């Protein structure tokens, strides 16, 4: 990991992302939909191809050479994730299909075993649907009660109100680290400490935080942390659930099948140890292998450098877009990642998105899988530009010109 802040050569970085070098609707592509998924650098694409060209075999069970190599590569990724998260034990790293999958695992395994009628689960107004619906399903099944931390108009959580919600009835707090819709960085350590004071366990949705913020699950002291590789310059359909070892050991398996067992008879099955207990079936081997390359790629640039670059883009975009009459930025939290959500007076976000696409600019429009947040803000949706390491100020200028064009066309 680089320790000194050295400016990244963005033009060189862009050459690592071949997808960026294309025309869309006759214009050079501007990709500002990074909060939905970011693009993959050549080393990651090569890692995927290399795995299938040289090493493809099913893992753990084989004794032939390819199976050994695939298993080693697969487990090397687990080791890499362990240090990426600064987890204490390797078996605390469970591979999943993504953030949504990890949250469902915790809700269905931990939740069904340890939560009962009348127990309370606290989430926040900022949550993505994937950190709302699994808890609603659990509440319905177990008779638990869902409580919601409110926000102010800037998109910051109201911690005083959170304090009032906490009680001995609170059994679990599930909170997003960084909001995908507004970019708010939550004071996650404070949120976790407050929950622990009443004895609740805490799950942190790190889908959006993981590519922007230095992570340390031991310092945070969270009980669970979930993320998706595809928001980390890695492949889709692969994610991680971190959990504290004692808690994971106390949880029943979530899915049954191969790999998660020690011994199976028709009378009784004994389960495998961590982490395999939660990894039934053949996993996404190639994608797991390629994640290591994605993390190495981020390290080679320096996560701090990436964050610094994105922060400069955030400041520049906020300043430039604020100058546009009839444009309002939604979400002005004290601490933000490079996400700018905005609305245009009298113009539907969908029209904005369609016209920007005609200009070659990819943004996200709509509710961003945060419908309750949008309704709290009194909005049907927003237009969202979100930044990654390969974006530039020139591209933000293109966005600003694009928005002016939208206003002209819709006037
Ligand atoms: C993307 C995202 C999710 C869902 O991730 P999947 O990869 O679709 O499972 C959850 N929470 C936040 C904050 C996100 O940004």
Image (cartoon, grey):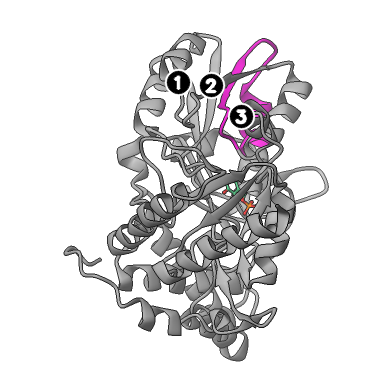
Q: Distance between the residues labelled 3 and 2?
A: 14 Å
Q: Can residue 119 be seen in this view?
A: yes
Identified at 49% across, 32% down, the residue is 155
Classify residue 186 by image quadrant.
top left
In the rendered image, the vertical position of residue 169 relative to residue 181, given as above or below: above
Report the mark closest to the observer, 1 or 2: 1
Q: How crowded is mark 2: few (under 14 residues within 10 Å), some or many (20 or more)?
A: many
Q: How crowded is mark 1: few (under 14 residues within 10 Å), some or many (20 or more)?
A: few
Is the CB of the residue bearing disc 2 within 8 angstroms of ligand 1? Answer: no
Q: Name the residue under label 3.
A: 377
Q: Name the residue under label 1.
A: 158
Mark 1 and mark 2 lie on one chain; the one further toward the N terminus is: 2
Left or right of 327 on screen, residue 140: right
Q: How far apart are marks 1 and 3 (CA)?
A: 15 Å
SS for tag 3? loop
**Region in magenta:** 106-127
SS for tag 1? loop
Q: Nearer the viewer, residue 260 or 320?
A: 320
Q: Which of 169 and 153 is in front in this view?
A: 153
């Amino acid at each position: 990991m680089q320790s000194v802040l050295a400016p990244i050569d963005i033009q060189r970085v862009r050459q690592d992302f071949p997808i960026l070098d294309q025309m869309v609707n006759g214009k050079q592509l501007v990709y500002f939909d990074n909060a939905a998924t970011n693009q993959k650098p050549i080393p990651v694409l090569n890692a995927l191809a290399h795995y299938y060209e040289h090493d493809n075999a099913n893992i753990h069970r084989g004794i032939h050479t390819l199976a050994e190599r695939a298993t080693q590569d697969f487990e090397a990724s687990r080791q890499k994730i362990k240090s990426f998260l600064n987890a204490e034990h390797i078996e605390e790293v469970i591979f999943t299909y993504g953030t949504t999958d990890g949250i469902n695992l915790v809700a269905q395994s931990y939740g069904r075993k340890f939560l009962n009628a009348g127990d309370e689960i606290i989430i926040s107004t900022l949550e993505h649907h994937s950190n709302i619906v699994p808890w609603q399903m659990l509440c319905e099944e177990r008779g638990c009660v869902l409580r919601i931390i409110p926000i102010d108009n800037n998109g910051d959580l109201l911690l005083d109100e959170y304090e009032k919600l906490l009680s001995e009835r609170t059994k679990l707090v599930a909170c997003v680290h960084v909001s995908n819709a507004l970019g708010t960085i939550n004071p996650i350590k404070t949120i976790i400490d407050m929950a622990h004071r009443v004895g609740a366990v805490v799950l942190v949705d790190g889908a959006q935080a993981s590519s922007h913020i230095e992570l340390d699950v031991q310092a945070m002291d969270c009980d669970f942390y979930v993320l998706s590789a595809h928001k980390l310059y890695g492949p889709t359909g692969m994610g991680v659930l971190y959990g504290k070892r004692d808690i994971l050991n106390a949880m029943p398996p979530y899915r049954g099948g191969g790999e998660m067992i020690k011994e199976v008879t028709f009378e009784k099955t004994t389960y495998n140890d961590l982490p395999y207990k939660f990894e039934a079936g053949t996993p996404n081997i190639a994608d797991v292998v390629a994640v290591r390359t994605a993390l190495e790629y981020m390290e080679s640039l320096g996560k701090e450098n990436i964050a610094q670059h994105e922060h400069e883009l955030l400041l520049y975009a906020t300043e430039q877009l604020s100058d546009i009459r009839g444009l309002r930025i939604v979400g002005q939290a004290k601490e933000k990642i490079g996400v700018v959500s905005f609305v245009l007076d009298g113009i539907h976000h969908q029209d904005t998105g369609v016209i920007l696409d005609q200009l070659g600019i990819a943004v996200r429009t709509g509710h961003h899988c945060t419908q309750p947040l949008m309704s709290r803000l009194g909005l049907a949706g927003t237009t969202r530009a979100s930044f990654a390491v390969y974006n530039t100020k020139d591209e933000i200028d293109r966005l600003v010109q694009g928005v002016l064009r939208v206003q002209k066309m819709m006037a």
